[in-house]
Amino acid sequence: MAGAYETTNKYLQQAFDVLKLDSTYKTLLWTPARELRVELVIEMDDGSIGNYIGYRVQHDDSRGPFKGGLRYHPDVDLDEVRSLASLMTWKTAVVNVPFGGAKGGIQVDPSELSLRELQRLTRRFTESVIIAIGPDLDIPAPDMNTNAKVMSWIFDEYSKHHGFSPAVVTGKPVELHGSLGRDAATGRGCMLAIREVLASAGRKLEGQRFAIQGYGNVGGWLARLLAEQDARVIAVSDVKGGIFNGDGLDIQRLDQHVVETGSVTGFAGAEAISNETLLTVDCDILVPAALGHVLTQHNARDVKAAYVLEAANGPTTFEADEIFNERGVVCVPDIYANAGGVCVSYMEWTQNTQKTTWTEAQVNASLEQHMVDSYRAIAKLQDEFKCSLRTSAFALGVRRVKSATDLRGLG
Ligand code: NAD
């Protein structure tokens, strides 16, 4: 199986092919602009020394400052961060926000650290990459296992050196210059993406059966918003396992259960299933909303859903994607499906730089417009090139980035 970066480059190659790009552009477009690897040494609560490795990969900034999340996970490595940084370049271009692409990560299991240790680690990381981030340079945001609290620490640490700088990160708490609607934005964007894709086939969200892997920021919000649309969420999971109820889960009660127990497992009125089983349950729309590379050549033929909505980044291997295409399973690609987060991050950054605040209704309306317009642009290219949604989304992103690169010229 190809690594994450190789997978992204294979998807890019398909876009290069339909666009008939020459090889000079290919090299230019898939090579990251800058890669930082930093050693993070912190004092642990018990007085011992903690030693961690962090990364920030800046892929492309031809359309605007580098932009992308920061992930805390034991599997973080340079290959994964490179892939995620590249995906951000195409994502910001697909939804037409004036940013480039970057990603960061620390190889750590945050559940093994106290809050104070996590804060020390985050501040040390900020110090180590401070030369490369900034409101007009590179703007981190939350990703797996990082949240508004982590963003507050980065904002505070950066501001110690550069003065009050809320626009250095997005996904901050609303009380600390965050944007209304940012928390729900990625889940809301996913809901809007699948709404548009279904509408193009004459279908509605109402009554569709969803299975969602991952019940964190993205998966949780998506479930809540789908329930509001009378869609049926029949299965969800988290790192501890999954639950299934063919009639649909009561999401309000499930949220209460998660607050009380910290997991979806053990929820009354649902049967326990494994994370692997969740991917192949009988449903209409399968939503990977946790880790990458979970849909592979080993399970793609068993997926029963007609649609795969990529809420997670890079959940589908290249081999699985080929199987889905062959079987007529429609994959709504990550670079469009989960772009709601970066859309509202752009709105947060805009509010910070203009020293103003938007209402939640303004934010949601603008997000909806971005998701609807982007789908129209992707669908138009799909018509033109007779290719998958993924290839047309990549082609749209590549066209926009190439055009900015050409206009700026080589200095
Ligand atoms: P999160 O940390 O809030 O939640 C992650 C969820 O996945 C949790 O429920 C966790 O228990 C579960 N999980 C972790 N390991 C798992 C495993 N091995 N099997 C099954 N479930 C597992 O993270 P998030 O912000 O919701 O991000 C989820 C995905 O969405 C990631 O791929 C991320 O890159 C992508 N994404 C997030 C955003 C955002 O704004 N947060 C934006 C775009 C894309």
Image (cartoon, rainbow, N blue to C red):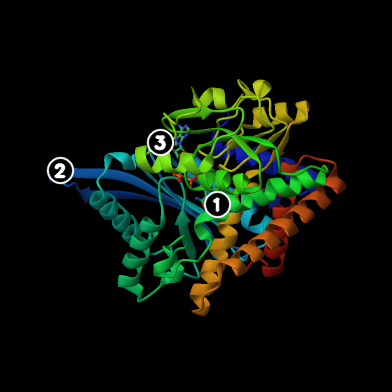
Q: Residue at x 45, y 28 (%)?
A: 241
Disc 2 designates what residue?
A: 48
Where does residue 407 sit, x and y in percent of width and height?
Answer: 71, 68
Mark 3 Cβ inside 8 Å of ligand 1: yes
Residue assigned mark 3: 263
| Picture coordinates of residue 167, whole percent (x, y) | 46, 70
Label 2: how many Cα within 10 Å (few below 14, some 14–19, many 20+):
few
Q: Secondary structure at mark 3?
A: loop
Secondary element under disc 2, as helix, strand or loop, is loop
Which residue bears the numbered disc 1? 32
Q: Marks 2 and 3, Cα distance to the nearest angstrom?
A: 31 Å
Task: Look at the picture and state if 190 lies above or below 263.
Answer: below
Q: Residue at x 62, y 66 (%)?
A: 98
Kind of residue at badge 1: Pro
Residue 211 coordinates in the image, percent (x, y): 60, 33
Q: Nearer the viewer, residue 201 or 300?
A: 201
